[in-house]
Amino acid sequence: MSDAERVNGAGYVTVRVPAKVNVQLSVGGLRADGFHGLANVFLAVGLHDEVTASPADGLQLTAEGADASQVPLDESNLAARAARLLARRHGRTPGVRLHIAKDIPVAGGMAGGSADAAGALLACDTLWGTRTPREELLAMCAELGSDVPFSLVGGAALGRGRGELLTPLETGGTFHWVFAVADGGLSTPAVYRECDRLREAEGGGATVETVPEPEASEDLLAALRSGDARALAGALSNDLQAAAVSLRPSLADTLKTGEAAGALAALVSGSGPTCAFLTGDAGSARDVAAALQASGHCRTARTTTGPAPGATVVRTG
Ligand code: ATP
């Protein structure tokens, strides 16, 4: 029997999965294994990719959306790797057509590839009826990449280790954000290397011997709990920001433009180059987005809110 016939008549499953912004990204020293310890506070926001899984005999992959041409459609695609991993776990062939409707900027520091991996896992698990326990799905997510477990879970969470050891966090309200999407991406490993280089150049060293163990900020966690945007604005931090700006100096102008237009705070999202602006309300978010758009300092400016739910099945047929 082919995989196409094995799916109990399910035609397709569509999963919506959110982008993230790191409201705190504290980077520890370079470890012997080449990774950095992190204190990483993730907030899921309402920019989404949708991953649709439908029956096929082999693994097929397609993508649509403004950035679709930058999405690799080969073995390296994280959604394809997720489907293969799940199939292997259940001793079946990865018979599935995966279609990614891409709205999260590619290589933008918003975990778009991780989102697609979590989306593909949930879509395939639903399509194939494999009913993988949640804990096992989370372990597979961590195997696929440090940011993938959070894409499954959504909301707000503290990530330790490489970011994959998650503790869900309470949030007391909705935060209004603007994201300035840049032309072209930044490579996450290159931004970490630049962070290490800058630390060395400043004379402090870049290894675990010299850089303090990163800790979550109590002020930040309290601001998330209270839902107070001003308090959150005062507590935002990103240790990769200087490195991203060093590699892409024009980001400094983008950050200044959003602040001048009334954002409560501006920061680079993750490893960039997307810039994130926290605003007090939806009206202020629209003003900041209009100013960014008019400035020409970004490809496009998007308004949205967070927290947003994690990967969710939104359609089946
Ligand atoms: P993060 O914030 O997790 O560091 P990012 O948002 O900066 O990641 P991604 O959009 O995840 O970056 O893309 C990083 C690279 O991953 C891309 O340049 C691309 O080559 C590769 N990639 C693999 N699978 C995907 C996918 N499904 N969508 C986008 N990029 C993918």
Image (cartoon, helix red, strand yellow):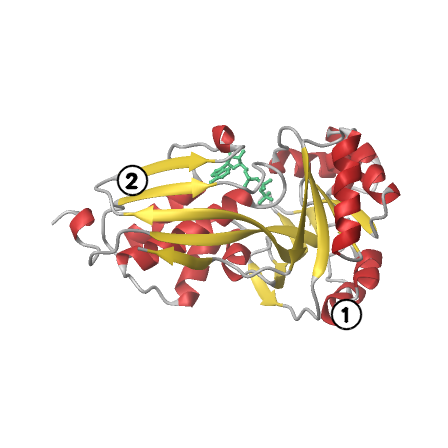
Q: Residues within 10 Å of mark 1 (few under 14, many from 20)?
A: some
- The reply, left or right, for residue 206 in relation to residue 82 is right
- In the picture provided, is 60 more to the left or to the right than 147? left
Q: Does the residue at mark 2 contact the one at mark 1 (Cβ under 8 Å)?
A: no
Q: Nearer the viewer, residue 154 or 158?
A: 154
Q: Residue at x 67, y 41 (%)?
A: 271
Q: Which label's residue is closer to the chain start, 2 or 1?
A: 2
| Apparent side of residue 19 relative to residue 249 in the rendered image (left or right) | left
Observer able to see residue 24: no
The mark total stands at 2
Q: Amino acid at mark 1?
A: Ala
The residue under the point 75% across, 67% down is 227
- The residue nearer to you, when weighing 100 against 117, is 100
Residue 291 pos. (x, y %): 80, 38
Please identify the quadrant where the C terminus is shown: bottom left
Q: Secondary structure at mark 2?
A: strand
Query: Within 8 Å of ligand 1, the CB of disc 1?
Result: no
Residue 70 spot, x, y in % from top left: 51, 30
- What residue is shown with label 2? 59
Q: Residue at x 77, y 57 (%)?
A: 281
Q: Quadrant of residue 112?
A: top right
Say what amino acid the circle numbered 2 marks: Leu
Q: For residue 17, which numbered disc appears in the image?
A: none
- Which residue is outermost to the left? 1
- Visible in this render: residue 52? yes
Q: Is residue 193 above or below residue 114?
A: above
- Alpha carbon separation for disc pair 2 and 1: 45 Å
Q: Position of residue 141 (x, y in %)?
A: 46, 54
Q: Residues within 10 Å of mark 2 (few under 14, many from 20)?
A: some
Residue at which label 1 appears: 222
Q: Is residue 72 left or right of residue 42?
A: left
Between 238 and 12, which is closer to the camera in this rendering? 12
